Amino acid sequence: MRPATPAPSGSGSGPPPATPPPASAPPLPSPTPAGSPSTDLTFTGSLASHVQSASPIGPCGRAPAGFAAQLQLTLSGQPYVLSIAIVDYGGPGQYTIPPERVSVRSGQGPGGQLLPAVGGTLVVDAGEQSGRIAATLGDGSAQVRGTWACT
């Protein structure tokens, strides 16, 4: 067995360099500042719009089969619903899309448009009523990123 080689002088004993996040997921927006969480979502591409308010539709948070939230919002003057479903919910934290399900839906019935998220990251904050999202929607022609809240 060989003895450990001492560190060169002047190298310090600080922490190792941080590992960068995987390149496959877009970076998440910064956490919401202290205080009441709020919705602040930026849609780009085919859904280009900025949303700063949303209303929950039904229960929002931990559910018997995971985590669920549906938020009514307005994009370019039209009603949409942002749906979040985490089947393997293990509590607050970061989840990958897919397998977790996120979608944006417009209108009702056969004339509505459904854009499922095809990649990205979703965070549920400690209170389980808010979080952050960075996702690519549909065929990649739209993206959403920012903070969401069930308040």
Image (cartoon, grey):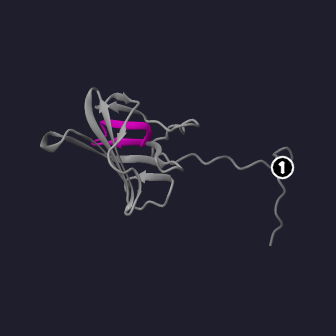
Above or below, comparing residue 118 to residue 90 in the picture: above
Would you say 10 lies left or right of 91 here?
Answer: right
Give the farthest residue toward the right: 9
Q: Secondary structure at mark 1?
A: loop
The question of residue 150 being in magenta is answered with yes
Measured from the top left, where is residue 45 in percent x and y? 32, 31
Would you say 1 lies left or right of 141 here?
Answer: right
Measured from the top left, where is residue 71 in percent x and y? 34, 42
Nearer the observer, 147 or 71: 71
Would you say 30 lies left or right of 25 here?
Answer: right
Residue picked out by circle 1: 8
Which secondary structure type mostly characterizes the magenta part of the structure?
strand
Q: Which residue is rendered at x = 30% and y = 36% of the image? A: 141
First to last magenta residue range: 134-151
Badge 1: few (under 14), some or many (20 or more) residues near its Cα, within 10 Å?
A: few
Above or below, comparing residue 59 to residue 65 in the picture: above
Nearer the observer, 4 or 142: 142
Q: Quadrant of the N terminus?
A: bottom right
The question of residue 93 being in magenta is answered with no
Q: Which residue is rendered at x = 46% and y = 47% of the image? A: 129
Measured from the top left, where is residue 41 in percent x and y? 41, 34
Above or below, comparing residue 76 to residue 4 in the picture: above
Give the farthest residue toward the left: 110
Give the farthest residue toward the bottom: 1
Q: Quadrant of the C terminus?
A: top left
Nearer the observer, 128 or 103: 128
Q: Which residue is rendered at x = 38% and y = 37% of the image? A: 144
Residue type at the position of mark 1? Pro
Q: Looking at the rendering, which quadrant does residue 105 occupy?
A: top left
Give the total of numbered labels.
Answer: 1
Q: Which residue is rendered at x = 85% and y = 44% of the image? A: 10
Measured from the top left, where is residue 65 in percent x and y? 37, 63
